[in-house]
Image (cartoon, rainbow, N blue to C red):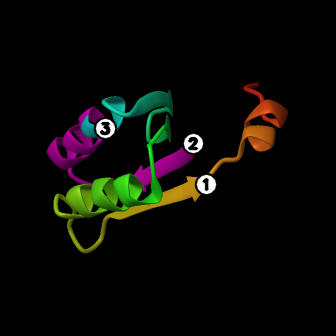
Amino acid sequence: CYVACFDIADDRTRDRVAKRLLGVGDRVQKSVFEILVASLGALNALAMDLRGLLEAEDDLRFYRLCLDCRKASCAA
């Protein structure tokens, strides 16, 4: 499991990235998703695909979320 978060200025680009991430995970905040990928290769492919949509000023990050971390986290 990974957390994907982004800061994207353009509404259309932001919607495209969000739609793609919804295909592989769940939205937990407006610009934060918990995603499941089968392998690191699949994550890299997803990242490359999404980076092709971004402008220079946009930011997209992925953080690994281990099972213990998921169990220890909660929503307020």
Local SS, label 1: strand
Position of the N terminus, as image quadrant, is top right
Q: Is residue 3 magenta?
A: yes
Q: Is the C-beta separation of discs 2 and 1 under 8 Å?
A: yes
Local SS, label 3: helix
Q: CA distance from mark 3 to mark 1?
A: 18 Å
Q: Which residues are magenta?
A: 1-19
Q: Which mark is residue 64?
A: 1
- Would you name the residue on which mark 2 appears? 1
Q: Quadrant of residue 45?
A: bottom left
- Would you name the residue on which mark 3 appears? 18
Q: Which mark is residue 36?
A: none
24 to the left or right of 61: left
Question: Which is more N-terminal, label 1 or label 2?
Answer: 2
Q: Is residue 24 magenta?
A: no
Q: Residue at x 81, y 40 (%)?
A: 68
Could you tell me residue 44's position as x and y percent?
36, 62
Q: Amino acid at mark 3?
A: Ala
